[in-house]
Amino acid sequence: MKATDSRNLHGHVIRELGKRIVVGDLRPGDVLPREEALAESMDVSRTALREALKVLSAKGLIESRPRVGTRVRATHFWNQLDADVLSWRCASMPADDFIEKLVEMREIIEPAAAAAAARRRTAAQLANVELAYRKMEASLDPEEWAVADLGFHDAVLQATGNELMISLFSVVESALGMFFVLSAKTAGNFNYSLPHHLKVLEAIRRKQPEIARKAMQSMIEDSLANLHKKRKGSSKKAS
């Protein structure tokens, strides 16, 4: 077997077992099949399986104990900000509570980031925020919009000059990307929030921190309200 094949199998096991755990097919407290049986069922070597289990253990998803075996850990042990864990949760269509928690995190970070960007941005950083806005303005479909939307928020974070904020954004980037796609697809007009983004851009341009903060907060609240409104409408149709 080639080394690349081994790495691919190793990654495959991580993804398959990780997804099963995150979506609830394997629940906290469940004990995984014995090593030889699990390796056979996944058509991988025991070596590849062991390496994959080490990775999942480092993510907090599983633990191995003598006489017990390998079992799924409770969710509060999971590394919820791990890029893989976030992407697995998003790929399984985020539950309402996960969306609420993601929005809550945005409310803590992004208004403060917009204010910091308005205080500290350089001319080059402002140009990047404006370029991202222009890409949103030119978007032709929800997917293109979501990519540009993510670029806009990334540009605002970069303009803060705060490495900790920037690093935190990079961790939740995949989750935010999925959120922006979901938000755009559930809106009647995917670019309905463009005026909110323009207000943030203009406040950063004019170096108005409090206006930037409030504009970003309004944008986040409006996005969540749009999702709630769409879901209530779908529930009424279903009933």
Image (cartoon, rainbow, N blue to C red):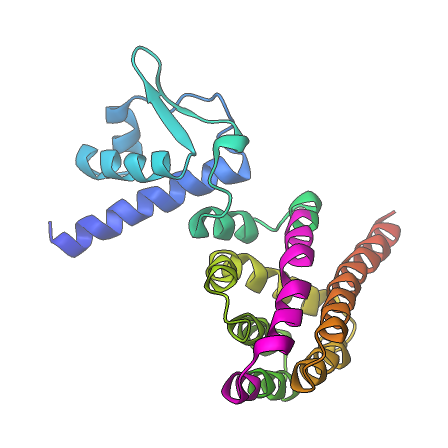
Label the magenta part by its dominant secondary structure.
Answer: helix
User: Foreground residue, 70 or 215?
Assistant: 215
Residue furthest to the left in view is 1
Q: Residue at x 79, y 65 (%)?
A: 222
- Image coordinates for residue 86, horizontal then vertical, percent: 51, 50
- Image coordinates for residue 81, horizontal then vertical, percent: 49, 48
User: Foreground residue, 62 or 15?
Assistant: 62
From the viewer's perspective, tell me whether residue 1 is left or right of residue 118.
left
Q: Which residue is drawn at 34% across and 43% down?
A: 14
From the viewer's perspective, tell me whether residue 135 is left or right of residue 65.
right
The stretch of residues the image draws in magenta is 101-128
Residue 121 drawn in magenta: yes
Does 43 appear above or below 82?
Answer: above
User: Foreground residue, 234 or 50?
Assistant: 50
Choose top left, top right, bottom left or bottom right for residue 67. top left
Residue 35 drawn in magenta: no
- Image coordinates for residue 148, horizontal then vertical, percent: 57, 78
Choose top left, top right, bottom left or bottom right for residue 202. bottom right
- Image coordinates for residue 138, horizontal then vertical, percent: 63, 89
Choose top left, top right, bottom left or bottom right for residue 129. bottom right
Number of numbered discs on residues: 0
Does 173 appear above or below 144?
Answer: above
Residue furthest to the top in view is 67
From the viewer's perspective, tell me whether residue 108 is left or right of residue 65.
right
Q: Which residue is drawn at 58% across and 86% down?
A: 135
